[in-house]
Image: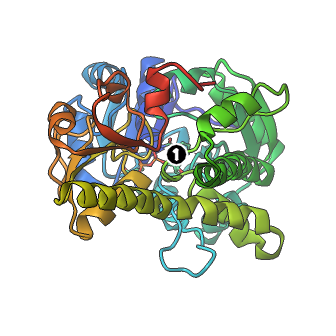
Amino acid sequence: MLIVKSNPPQICILGLGYIGLPTAALLSHHGYYVNGVDINLEVITTINQGKIHIVEPDLELLVQQAIHNQRLTASCFPSPADIFIICVPTPFHENSGNIPQPNIDYVLSAAESIIPVLKPGNLVILESTSPVGTTEKIAELFKLSGRSTDQIHLAYCPERVLPGNILQELIHNDRVIGGLSPEATTLAKKFYQIFCQGQLLTTDARTAELCKLAENTYRDVNLAFANQLSMLCPNLGIDVRELIYLANHHPRVNILQPGCGVGGHCIAVDPWFIAAADPHNTSLIQTAREVNNSKPQWVVTQIITLVEEFQQKYQRSPTIGCFGLAFKPNVDDLRGSPALEITTTLIHAGHTVLVVEPNLNFHERLELTPWQSAIVNADILVFLVAHKEFLNLDINDKKYLDFCGVTSRKNNVFTN
Ligand SMILES: NC(=O)c1ccc[n+]([C@@H]2O[C@H](COP(=O)([O-])OP(=O)(O)OC[C@H]3O[C@@H](n4cnc5c(N)ncnc54)[C@H](O)[C@@H]3O)[C@@H](O)[C@H]2O)c1
């Protein structure tokens, strides 16, 4: 049984990023005492001031209230609690070959850090997107330390939230919960009932782990198909967005929208966790990754072609305005961003580039230009990310390339 020492239960959340911080704030809002733990001192200091270090609607107010009410404290070390939630990064190892290998070091380190404060009856939930078998590895770690998993309940419950709408989705999304034992599953389900209004679907830990990876891989494969269409359509004189709009009127077809690549720390990463587990049976998954990884270079080639045309016509090099750096619309997150890759490739090749990212005030390496002046001063506008600020721009007299569909949306055509 979960031994609840305090009423309401004390929660300890490891990792105060896009997942951990909104979860901590929401639980505090529901009256729970949350110790948020992070290894980044700046993050701790910011949160303890009632501020946030990420861009997420409505989150700052919730964190401010939680800190003010002393329901949330941020610190560098875990303290004893009834429930521990691990929300730390799970990247892949850089340069680990054709199939990048998952890096679960952060997860194991977070799990290790709670060992000294674990007590019999504690529930430990892993939320980080993880390769199959990671929850079992945590159990092994606890066993090695002399903790019996009979006394500590371990469950895996992945996150499905969409940055930009995290607080709503934390409440309303359906969740998959897989314990290492039926009891752990039941306890974890009981815990999520506190704040989740979506369906809570139970299974075992391994199935829950693969379920999350399969969801993101499904999207990656579909995006690879859309991106492949977007690369072949210009050669055939066809507008890919019109094509997809028309195809999606078939009752059983739903092609996603192509972009300038696939980035971020989820969809571009998680398929490799499946491929790494079984390289021989994942050719489709691996190919989809390669197609999506090749898209930014294709985009650069399209831009260079237009630049060369401009040079021939006007006998000077154009100024290029790159609109959007983030890996997806309306967020400040640059992790694995294809837009960032494209922009820096153009700059390194010696082009004059005005870099626009309305969700950032500052970038340590790139000088940012407000979109208003980039529209005026750039000769060629390149739309890489469909941020809301770019939706209604007056660009009729400008040369532009749109790799994110933001100009189609403005005219309200081909969107579905
Ligand atoms: N961001 C999303 O939209 C999203 C969606 C679904 C799943 N996920 C998954 O959730 C997990 C967390 O993602 P995120 O976006 O919140 O990451 P993040 O990078 O925003 O935050 C992770 C935090 O964990 C901290 N950290 C690292 N090691 C730690 C340790 N040992 N102890 C305590 N803190 C530690 C980091 O300093 C960082 O602040 C990842 O596995 C990710 O794939 C993220």
Q: Is residue 260 visible?
A: yes
Graded by Cα atoms within 10 Å as few (under 14), some (14 to 19) or many (20 or more), the crowding at tag 1 reads many
The percent position of residue 57, horizontal first and vertical second, equals: 37, 23
Q: Residue at x 51, y 53 (%)?
A: 261
The percent position of residue 13, horizontal first and vertical second, equals: 46, 42
Say whether residue 201 is left or right of residue 262: right
Q: Is residue 147 visible?
A: no
Q: Residue furthest front?
A: 313
Tell me the SS state at disc 1.
loop
The percent position of residue 375, horizontal first and vertical second, equals: 21, 35
In depth, the one of 134 and 322 nearer the eye is 322
In depth, the one of 187 and 338 nearer the eye is 338
The amino acid on which the numbered mark 1 sits, given as a three-letter code, is: Gly
Please, is residue 278 above or below residue 232 in the view? below
Say whether residue 411 is left or right of residue 74: right
In depth, the one of 194 and 362 nearer the eye is 362
Viewport quadrant of the C terminus: top right
In depth, the one of 260 and 59 nearer the eye is 260
Q: What's the colour scheme?
A: rainbow
For the residue with label 1, is its CB less than 8 Å from the closest atom of ligand 1?
no
Q: Residue at x 49, y 80 (%)?
A: 95
Q: Residue at x 70, y 47 (%)?
A: 222
The percent position of residue 275, horizontal first and vertical second, equals: 71, 68
**Residue to which mark 1 is pinned:** 259
Residue 362: image quadrant is: top left
Viewport quadrant of the N terminus: top right
Q: Residue at x 70, y 66 (%)?
A: 287
Please, is residue 408 above or below residue 126 in the view? above
Say whether residue 282 is left or right of residue 93: right
Looking at the rendered structure, the number of numbered marks drawn on it comes to 1
